[in-house]
Image (cartoon, rainbow, N blue to C red):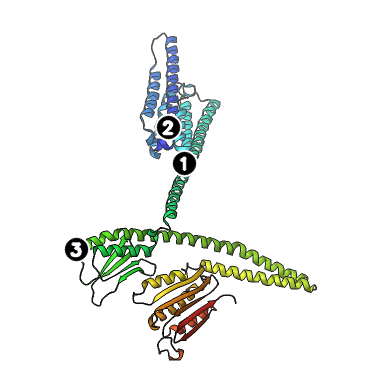
Amino acid sequence: MAERTNPWESRFHKLLLALMWVALVLGVFISFWEARKVESARGAVGVGADAIGAAMSAGVYVLGSQILPRALLRTTWVRELTSIVGVTLVMMAVSLSGGLNSPYLLLSLTPVMLAGLFGGFRSGLATAGLAAGVLVIISVGLDDFSLPLFFQWAGLYVLIGFTFGQARRLLVEEGARADALAAASIEVSLRLERLERANTLLTRFTEVADTAELNPVTVGHEALESLAEVASFRAAVVALAGDDGPVVVARRGTEEPGDPRSIIPLSVGNRDVGMVVLMSAQELTPAENQATAETLQPVALAFSNILLLQDIARRAVREERARLARDLHDEIGPSLASLGLALDLALLQHPADPDLAEHLRGLRTSVGSMVEDVRSTVADLRMPEQPSVTEVLKGLVASLPEEAPEIDVLLTERRPPRPSIAPEIVAIVTEAVRNAVRHSGSQTITVHGTVDFDEGNITVHDDGKGFLRDRVPDGHYGLVGMEERAERIGAVLNITSTRGGTAATVTWGPG
């Protein structure tokens, strides 16, 4: 792993080992040559014991450096021990071969190089100081100390230690930079891959978004038709999992009192996506249970797809709403406020011109209105996402029993109500529908009107028996609650009732 991460370290180490061999060969050759010259001058033939001892000491150092694994040199105590032993062996060769004039002085540079290469500044300079100190002791002991020559070699030791330490630092930084770039490149590649996969998935979602498989009502009715072929039951309900509990999307048959119920949960993985409730005259047989489970497998998958698509859509809408709210609050709002201050200053500077002052006051009023609109819009965008009135009414209709009056939803909803008033509008309309279902005795209930964000009107009309407001029994506060909700948001609630039916109309917005 280290060689792959730091290829320069491997190359430097190999070069250093080659330099050791070169220095060793030169040192042995020169020391033996000088020894033979000395022996010849004395009239003898052979090589002196000092030359042989110096060669053996230097050879042990070089061979040991070749054998020692590079990975061990990265360990602090091994590296420091190697530096001390290396300096000791090489300086023994130097002391046996002439001191400051020894041919092994070139080899004495290599322990400093090794320490700087693997240990950095501190290790390199420490080894350089050790080598210089030992060299002083040797030269003084041999009585051939030369200050200029010593300073040359001591300075060379320090320079080598500093240079190799600096080289290591630069190469380590460059390696870290290269690793960071490689990691960034990998991250970019992974991000592109994720974006491509997301694009493919979203493309597929777009292709199937309008299909029947992603319409929960259609899926629910098809499930009930399929279940009728494999199991006998009087009534059945299919519900999709929702944030506030199961939402009934399909209903079939009429339940008889005392009928046993079979609740079949629908799940995909660890997520509950809905349920099916079967009411029958008797318990389902094992064969019917197995056939029912097999029939509902594609229904569970379809419901899971519907919920996943809803999650994606809600997340996208939520993030976009948050972005718009930030932009309005941080950019447009302050700009409008600055414009208002500028108009105020202009009014103070030109009070004598009545036409200009009137014009500026009109602009100031418009700017103030715009600031309030921006604040209201930011508040709306920061509120949780609200369902449309049509969506809520369809869910309400699907949850009603079959014997309930027929409900026609004829709303023209261009945009759902403003989020700040939507909960109250929805509560008023649903309460009006529930009152008509429970108390009117009608055959048909019609919900009609128009909805366009901050203005609209919705009428809930039934053809029932009507009622008298002053004869509402005690303990029934539905009408009072509707009026309080309308007053809270500045809407107008008008309820008219005759023997031919009742109409409740809620109106909000300008005019």
The numbered disc on residue 182 is 1
**Neighbour class for label 1 at 10 Å: few (<14), some, many (≥20)?**
few
Residue 351 appearing in the image: no
Above or below residue 183? Residue 502 is below
* Type of amino acid under label 1: Ala
Classify the position of the C terminus by image quarter. Answer: bottom right
Above or below residue 43? Residue 286 is below
Which numbered disc flags the more N-terminal residue, 3 or 2? 2
The numbered disc on residue 371 is none
**Which residue is tagged 2?**
10
Separation of marks 1 and 2 at Cα, in angstroms: 20 Å
Above or below residue 76? Residue 492 is below
Residue 271, by quadrant, is: bottom left
Question: Is residue 466 found left or right of 336 in the rendered image?
Answer: left
Q: Residue furthest bottom?
A: 470
Residue 19, by quadrant, is: top left
**Which residue is tagged 3?**
286
Residue 359 place in picture, x, y as percent: 74, 71
**Neighbour class for label 3 at 10 Å: few (<14), some, many (≥20)?**
few
SS for dot 2: helix
Separation of marks 3 and 1 at Cα, in angstroms: 60 Å
SS for dot 1: helix
Which numbered disc flags the more N-terminal residue, 3 or 1? 1
Residue 393 place in picture, x, y as percent: 43, 72
Residue 344 place in picture, x, y as percent: 71, 70
